[in-house]
Image: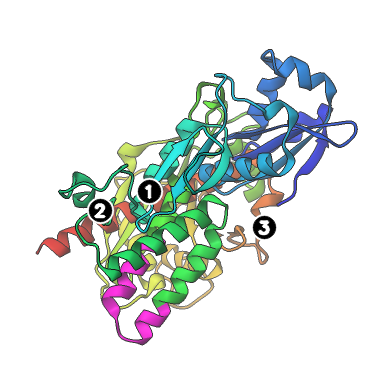
Amino acid sequence: MEFKYISTNQVKNLPAMIGVYAFQSKKGVLLYVGKAINIKERVKNHFNQPTFKDNIFIPKTTKIGFIVTGSEIEALLLEAKLIKKYLPKYNTQWKDGKNYYFVAITAEIFPRVFTTHQRSTNKPLTLIGPFVDGQALKQTLRVLRRVFPYRTCKTLPKKVCLYKEMKLCPAPCQLKVQSVKLKVRKNIKNLIKILRGQKNSVIRNLQKEMRLASQKQNYEKAQALRDQIMALENIFSHSHILRGAEEATEWLPQKLFNDTGPFYGLQKVLGTKNKIKRIEGYDISNIQGQQATGSMVVFENGLSNKNEYRKFHIKIEGQPNDTAMLKEMISRRLKHKEWPMPQVMLIDGGKGQLNTTLTVVGRADLPFREGLPFPDFSKVISLAKRKNELFIEGKDKPILLKNLPPETANLILRIRDEAHRFAIAYHKKLRSKSLLI
């Protein structure tokens, strides 16, 4: 990933999205690298409310670089990678006077994982870093431990501890067998890759392993790997780790109906004169058609209204037919006339999901359209994950989200991700209940 640069008088053009930013001198030297949940607001804060360190390097800054990331964890990992690569002068020490944080992994048969300030010790270690934000790093390790359990104790205990019961440790203290050794090594290998910013490589390897297990009819292993992949993707999409005082910015501006608010931007993109006050987002979650769930999340006046959220236990079971499941969910939603109608209906998916929804609301140019009650002033849109392409009813070609105003793109992503989170949460709940029966 490479920085995109703008001049210091173009701060207003920075994206209001999660990512990493950098201050560059006239000679092209990086002076400082940071991360933020809102790059624009964080950089503006450096200029408007400068610290003692800011006052040293800001006068030397001629350009500001930025890289948008898909999640807060990716921003944390990318910041560490860039600091290690460029060694920015004003990133030498964190504000509390301590050295950087590193993730240390011992060279034992059953490796121990911990954080440290020390760059070198007498013991052989794998050190990953440097990380500036210790609190965010520790939170990231906690959530990654749910996917790749690892050992943290200094010495192996004689009795199994609570971490094994919580499925956060493979318990090598009691199960010193070859299968556990292999599992521990695999977990550590994947953890190291992720902390070095190689998440996609890990997911590809897990997917390959899942396909091989399925071909060998080892369906239990294949399902476990599928769960691991889903958990890893969910953690990167929804974990909130950047919540320090200096980065506590809101996702959405409070003034939403002026000429710069994200709702107004979406209104312009959709080509409607009607004010957008309510947006509903939809998603489907299932594993090979089993325990299928649907979610409806609601954003009103720029904020999520969780009292209006709705979840659907999909009745079509036994086959992975997302189109039929979506059709069922939208049909059931529109039959609730007592629920307020949205100005925008955002569907997770591409052109196919958009057309399916349009058949339900009676706007598709097809003989089998249902035509359930749906107001003329409402619009249906869908967002495809792969390239973040936005499909809009009535338009042949999609719009790339990166070409929209940052506030509008950020709003659409937030609603899509929230619908995804809500659907997965309900799916996991149903799956847990089925395992207890």
Task: Characterize the magenta stretch by its predominant secondary structure.
Answer: helix
Q: Hey, which residue is sitting farthest right in the picture?
A: 27
Placement of 378 over or under 223, stated as above or below: above
Q: Nearer the viewer, residue 395 or 286?
A: 286
Q: Of the two numbered discs 2 and 1 on the same chain, state the one appearing first in sequence.
A: 1
Q: Nearer the viewer, residue 125 or 273?
A: 125
The x, y position of residue 365, in whole percent, is 54, 73
Residue 43 figure quarter? top right
Q: Residue tagged by mark 3?
A: 399
Q: Residue tagged by mark 2?
A: 167
The x, y position of residue 331, in whole percent, is 34, 62
Residue depicted at x 66% and y 42% = 84
Q: Is residue 213 magenta?
A: yes
Q: Secondary structure at mark 1?
A: loop
Q: Decide: marks 3, 1 in contact (CB < 8 A)?
A: no
Placement of 395 over or under 309, stated as above or below: below
Kind of residue sitting beneath label 2: Lys
Separation of residues labelled 3 and 2 (CA atoms): 43 Å
- Which corner quadrant holds the C terminus? bottom left
Q: Residue tagged by mark 1?
A: 112
